[in-house]
Image (spheres, rainbow, N blue to C red):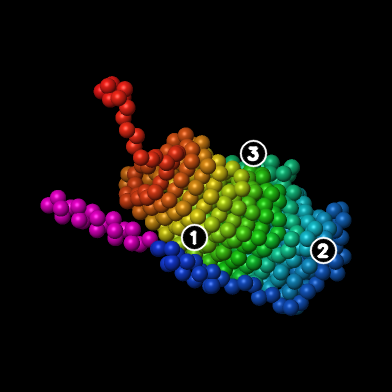
Amino acid sequence: MKRYIIVLVIFMITNIMSAQLDETAREKVMGEIINRIELPAIPDYTISIMQFNAKGDSLTDNKQAFDKAMQAIKENGGGTIVVPKGIYNINGPIHFVDNVNLKLEEGARLKFGSNPKDYPLVLTSWEGTMLYNYSPMIYGIDLENIAITGKGTIDGEAKNSWANWRELQEKDQLLSREMNHNNVPVEERIFGEGHYLRPQLIQFVNSRNILIEDVTIEDAPFWCLHLLKCSSATLRGLKYDAHNYNNDGIDLEYTRDILIENVKFDNGDDNLAIKAGRDHEGRSNADQASQNIVMRNCLLKGLHGVVIGSEMSAGVKNIFVDNCKAWGDLKRGIYFKTNPDRGGYMKDIYVSNIELGKVEDLFFITANYHGEGEGFNSKISDIYINNVTSEEATGTAIVIEGYEDSKVENVKLNNIHVKKASNAITIKNTENVVFEQVIIGEEAGVPTTATTEEVSKF
């Protein structure tokens, strides 16, 4: 009987871990995702923003010039708008049209105004709840073939304006959640004047074939770059200098088939945050899970490196993060977070070849984010972390915590080395967590031989 039990246990563990993709299979799946992603098809037609009386003098309001340029591109069926070197004040948003590349040449800087009256209400999402709020500085909805390229800078100019709204947002933040939980129709979720939800800097909604490449992103009011219900996007060569509250670098929500590569993050919150709606509304959109996302060859610096959640109620799956390195400190390197308000799931997550410096926690999975919520536990399973190093964890190197009735399952950590840690490991309410070649602190060597003096003590 004992032999039967042992054989059964071995069979179960082998069967569970066989679901893990080996390196060759991972490369194949990543390749399939990348090959599905289409770059935008932009017609061979180019205009300069200067043709519309724009002035890069840091004084003139260029809102009308950008609106006219977008209209001209629309009438032509698409093309490229070139923005030469200069500082372009824009009092209001740039709203994209189909088939357009906004090309910011080196030395070009877009500086957005901070008067809320200049930003009309648009359909957006705020912390996972769909609603109408002030337009992001750059915005597009229901589009195909859109690009922002070049060596220029997009500056939200929010540090001394929009950023101050964070201290005023709680009432509206709670109102948005109440509307979500009570199934208030989206068209009745009207924010804007008299409310204090900060807009994103760049947001595209329900759009596909997107390229954002090489630009620098600075001083966002809220999240820096938010793709909402989008597919087939390439985000590469971006640089960040954004340090206001909630300046996430990239937020992907209800979004699929995404490649993120060669990005240099330096922002005031999550570098990458993968989300999928919040609570009741998110769970009702279970067919819109965020999935098939590849992040590779990026430099990490900010609050947290790679994050899933906490708004992930429609589910997150098939995520691949490879060959990334910190170039500054992080609070948490790899952070998956949810709570019993969310429901949904996280599964089939692969993180490999990550090199971090000092962190508070290297790897943190929690089903109890903020210690709040009830009734809708999330399912967290099938997570594989391979080849990760950290110089120091000032908090706890590895934390995995589920619930007694909703355990975190099938997690494998292989070849992990944290050179120094205040605390090593906390694991609670889990099943089938496998550690292989995990070293926290100095690696143990051959056991020493007891001296005569030591023996005499016993």
Query: Depth-wise, is mark 2 or mark 1 nearer the camera?
Result: 1
- What predominant SS class does the magenta segment belong to? helix
Q: Earlier in the sequence, mark 3 or mark 1?
A: 3
Residue corresponding to mark 1: 320
**Residue at image coords 31%, 30%:** 450
Tell me: residue 324, above or below residue 30: above
| Mark 2 to mark 1 CA distance (whole Å) | 37 Å
Left-right relation of 3 to 155: left
User: Which amino acid type corresponds to the residue marked 2 in the rendered image?
Assistant: Pro
Task: Report whether residue 440 is seen.
Answer: yes
Q: Is residue 14 magenta-colored?
A: yes
**Residue 127 visible at all:** no
Name the residue located 78 percent from the left edge and 63 percent from the top edge.
105
Residue 59: % across, % down: 86, 53
Mark positioned earlier in the residue sequence (2 or 3): 2
Does residue 40 appear left or right of residue 399 in this picture?
right
Q: Quadrant of residue 402?
A: top left
Could you say where residue 79 lies in the image, as x and y percent from the top left? Answer: 74, 74
Residue wearing tag 2: 84
